Image (tube, coloured by chain):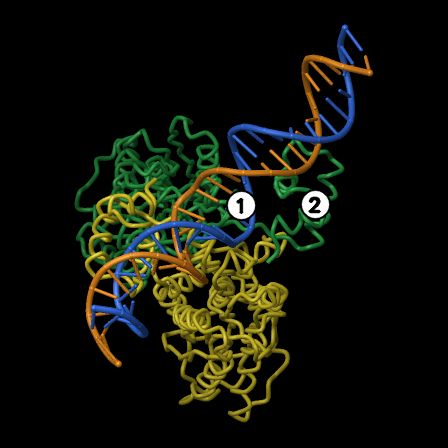
Chain colours: A yellow, B green, C orange, D blue
Amino acid sequence: MITIKDIARAAGVSHTTVSRALNGSSLIKPGTRAKIAKIAADMNYVPNYNAKNLVTKKSNTIGLFFSSLEQGTSSSFLVDALKGIRQMLNENYMLTVSGIDDMSGLDSIHPRRFDGILVMSQSERDNRFIYHAKAAGIPLVVLNRQLDDPSIPNVASEDRRGARAAAQHACEMGHRRIGIIEGRSGFKSADERRQGFIDGLLANRLAPDMRFFVQGDYSIESGRAAMEKLLSLEDKPSAVFCCNDDMAIGAMNACFDKGILIPEDLSLIGFDDMMFAAYTNPPLTTIRKSVSEIGREGTELLLKLMEQPDTPPVQRLIGCELVRRSSVSNLSNRKN
Amino acid sequence: MITIKDIARAAGVSHTTVSRALNGSSLIKPGTRAKIAKIAADMNYVPNYNAKNLVTKKSNTIGLFFSSLEQGTSSSFLVDALKGIRQMLNENYMLTVSGIDDMSGLDSIHPRRFDGILVMSQSERDNRFIYHAKAAGIPLVVLNRQLDDPSIPNVASEDRRGARAAAQHACEMGHRRIGIIEGRSGFKSADERRQGFIDGLLANRLAPDMRFFVQGDYSIESGRAAMEKLLSLEDKPSAVFCCNDDMAIGAMNACFDKGILIPEDLSLIGFDDMMFAAYTNPPLTTIRKSVSEIGREGTELLLKLMEQPDTPPVQRLIGCELVRRSSVSNLSNRKN
DNA sequence: GTTATAAATGTTAACGTTTTCATCATAATA
DNA sequence: TATTATGATGAAAACGTTAACATTTATAAC
């Protein structure tokens, strides 16, 4: 393995000069720099990052942590996040991916191992991790979950407004009995979406009907089960808002099994706009939230934070938008 | 930051002794070891991996490379792979994730930066990367794509047998006009599945009908387009095998748009058994391939290879299995 | 009680960088 | 021309570990 000293020897200079030349120090004469650069290239020199990082106390590594790799994290979510992040990240940063839940101890979360940390957080259970990283002095930004603590940089989607838009849309289409299949209890996003839904109802002078609130956990199966509950009601809702697309798919399945037609008999609205939402039968009307944009914004923030650690923490919200497809029927010009 | 020397001072021994004690050397008296371990824990010691790796010439890092993060890689695929790999990987290994296609140069692929490499390969275009890594002397195993070169450790699924089973199933259900929507041209898996499909036909004394072979590229949209072509045929197939589930979903959509009922009018078989396959309408009969198992097996292999670099390269194939759901009709007891 | 042997610990160098401080040219100033 | 800045380079130390080799201490053998 060829080192800086080999280059120095070949160039007839000291290894210090080589180091400087290769790192773009202004103290090096252009001629010398060019010569050294050429030799380094010819010799196929690759710096030893362990040595480099040892003295600079950097790691060249960004850690991306999900609440869980195993469960609760939908795959498109993970991939979109990854994409957005990688787009912003200089190629010679390493990006590691791990699940918080399958970490036995927090010892490995150390400034020397991570220059910065991105947490794709779904649940408050991540707080232990988050505060550990923060206490360790590692620049970090929490993505996806809205935090109450303003001291932690945060990028999330406007879950509440998105859900509100969903309710609003249902109302505009003439629906008055509107149900909701809620997200996993304890997840901030679930609270936000629930609240946004209620806001939307209220804004349309509709009183939330508690019989139409049913608990889910963001999984397909929970969506199915929840919908079955809703369908067993005497006075069924005419539309239901599912707090994510996975549950909407489960709900669709339940309807299909019971012979309920969507949107003729029941309207459905999802949340997330994952790839398959456009290909369900019927195509799902849903709220688009851009995970990759969250990833990009978050990475940008983190990078800035790493450069200037005293940057004041920012909370940023990424907009959601309603995408109308075919799972909501228009009741407004007929009797309800 | 506390170092091995701080511990040494506190324990009244040399830092070498501390190093040995902490690394489980047999040369250390149990008493001494216990004392040192306690002190280290008390002081919250975390080893500096840069220093460690500098002298051991290790990196503690496994690189996971996908052909592309941006396109062609379905998300469930990525996640399943990640899960399988993480399960086998000792927690203090770092796992980095990157796309081969968004790498400008191969310089960063260096033995000092990666103890081992896993390539989730989909296309022959990855070969440049693969051979570079191999030439650099980094232990690597190629996953997911069957390689022709027996010198490279390889774990993939039995695409061919899986596809054969799909064709076989269609035949057993009484279908005789069976079409195929092929995978992305140039991808090994596409060739294998096509060939397996033909094998299955032949085994049932069915001559492949070239009008029923239509090209796709593994994307949902290509599945839809391909199915439209098939449906425009005068003499339509009664069953079609889609080389992955994504395309099967696209195909379903095309059918639905044209009012073709599945499975009454047309039977459909997918490949992969991704999560949503069980929730399409109707639920998709498909070939299950376990990406996470590929990940696990591959990681196991890699770990062994890293320990004993002279382990002879192995090609391993992971079995596929037919999972029957409701997208294939039984024609065998009525006239075709 | 030596002496030989093994077990436990210590000394020192090495890994490949960057950085601090010193040195030496060279150009600018008096 | 002597003096001082300035620009370019080099020497040596430092980063926190492990490992080769040296030394001490305990144990066994005679």
Q: How many circles with numbers are drawn on the protein?
A: 2
Residue B87, disc = 1
Q: CA distance from mark 1 to mark 2?
A: 28 Å
Toward the viewer: C1 or A168? C1
Residue contact between numbered discs 1 and 2, judged by CB atoms under 8 Å: no
Q: Are marks 1 and 2 on the same chain?
A: yes
Earlier-in-chain disc, 1 versus 2? 2
Quadrant the C terminus of chain B occupies: top left
Query: With respect to residue B310, does A38 lie above or below?
Result: below
Task: Name the chain letter of the residue that bears numbered label 1.
Answer: B
What residue sits 21% from the left and 35% below the top?
A: B207
Q: Residues within 10 Å of mark 2 (few under 14, many from 20)?
A: some
Amino acid type, callout 1: Gln
Residue A104 place in picture, x, y as percent: 63, 52
**Callout 2: SS:** helix
- Front one among A14 and A75: A14
Chain to which the residue tagged by mark 2 belongs: B
Judge from the rendering whether residue A88 lies leftward or rightward of residue B231; answer left or right: right
Picture disc at residue B37 = 2
